[in-house]
Image: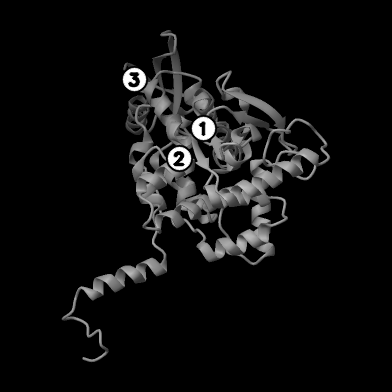
Amino acid sequence: MKYSVHINKGIWHVSFYIKDATGKRKLKQLSTGIKGLNNRGEQINKRKGEDKAKEIIAKYEGVVDSEYGGWTLDKCAAYCLELKKTKLSPTTYNDYLNALETHLKPYFANRKPIRDLKPKDIESFCNYKLSEGKSPKTVHKLLSLIGPAFRYAEKNDFIIKNPMNVVDKPLKSKSVTNYYNAEQLNALAKAAKGSYIETPVILAMILGLRRSEIVGLTWDNVDFENRLIHIRQAVIVGDSSILTPGTYKVIGRTGSKKPRDIILKFFLKTDSSERSFTMNDDLYNYLKALKVTHDTMPRETKAYMDFVCVNAVGTLITPDSITSHFAKLLDENGLPHIKFHALRHSCISLLANNNSFSMKQIQDYAGHGDFLTTFNVYSHADDSAKKTEMDYITSCFTELFDHNGTE
């Protein structure tokens, strides 16, 4: 790239031409920051000015001059999120938006543009978040927002090198999912009886359903005649505009400060998530009695007549309200804190700890498309199982232990 070095207002400057996004040449004149004249008006620091000019030229070699290159990282990340929002679920999209507003914008807004960011700038951001008490897992999620911005800039020649390629990311701690054993589940069932979320808790514990599947369950998918429950749809909260028309129905709006759509999706997380359960007498009788209650109770709205999980006046129990009420329920009853989704984990773990069921049976019950998901994530051995296994192993070593109690 051709360039010239000259003094402007006592400072060495470098002038060169760069093409914009349309291919048109555009003159750029940038300060090197090197003083070019002394107090007597004599030229000084020419070599330093030329060296700094070379650094600037190297930075702009092959770069397209674009408005995008001058954006701050948070603005770039927001732009890229909008580009791919139709590929995300409304819940995921909403989580990313919150992360942008809560973490990226306060830190990167009004700072240097994306083309000037170095790996150390991103690492400083990571360390700052860790110092705030954020977990490495959370920081990795934030980096998943930052990454697409740099990839887009690199792909379109707004930057020469992608700093994310050499960023040292914080090490993730091994994720440990807490779950309940049978005794704790019994205590929870007792505590949940008569509560606002009694039915969601029961469906999660017995069927291992996801929260969205529980809220999406309707009476037309409860076949009392054949004793079957069909899981075919889900309810989520978010921006419905990013979904494909014909795949959903907006059934309400949240009453929060930032109202969001309550969306009935006509599809589930994976194809294998669509499944059916055969009701035993316990679940059949519970749902039959619940249906009678729903048919006779006073309702503030008829919008949710066919939904299984409604409150005492017929309003839908939303996914967010399940989460908040669940935490409160655990607090009030002195139960160990777990996420509501951990009830699904607890259910499947109970099955996995029973040798009567094969992993294939458990996979179908959980609605997993991948056998390894069931095996790696949900197969746990409780303490009693470990003791039984150890008893068997030690019984094989007759010369190592005296099973009569003598040495």
- In the image, residue 287 sits, relative to residue 52, either above or below, namely below
Circle nearer the N terminus (3, 2): 3
State yes or no: discs 2 and 1 in contact (Cβ < 8 Å). yes
What is the quadrant of residue 370 in the picture? top left
Residue depth check, mark 3 versus mark 1: number of the one nearer the observer: 1
Secondary structure of the residue carrying numbered label 2: loop
Residue at the outermost left position: 399
Res. 367 mark: 2
Residue depth check, mark 3 versus mark 2: number of the one nearer the observer: 2
Kind of residue at badge 1: Leu
- In the image, residue 401 sits, relative to residue 32, either above or below, namely below
Kind of residue at badge 2: Gly
Nearer the observer, 291 or 215:
291
Which residue is label 1 attached to?
Answer: 268
Nearer the observer, 137 or 354:
354
Circle nearer the N terminus (2, 1): 1
The 10 Å Cα crowd at callout 2, few under 14, some 14 to 19, many 20 or more, is: many
Q: Is residue 390 visible?
A: yes
Res. 62 mark: 3
What is the quadrant of residue 372 in the picture? top left
State yes or no: discs 3 and 2 in contact (Cβ < 8 Å). no
Q: Quadrant of the N terminus?
A: top left
Q: Is residue 71 visible?
A: no
Between the residue at mark 2 and the residue at mark 1, the CA separation in whole angstroms equals: 10 Å
Kind of residue at badge 3: Gly
Circle nearer the N terminus (3, 1): 3
Question: Residue 169 location in percent, x, y?
Answer: 39, 47
Between the residue at mark 3 and the residue at mark 1, the CA separation in whole angstroms equals: 46 Å
Residue at 61 percent across and 37 percent down: it is 217
The 10 Å Cα crowd at callout 1, few under 14, some 14 to 19, many 20 or more, is: some
Is residue 30 toward the left or the right of residue 281 in the image? left
Q: Quadrant of the C terminus?
A: bottom left
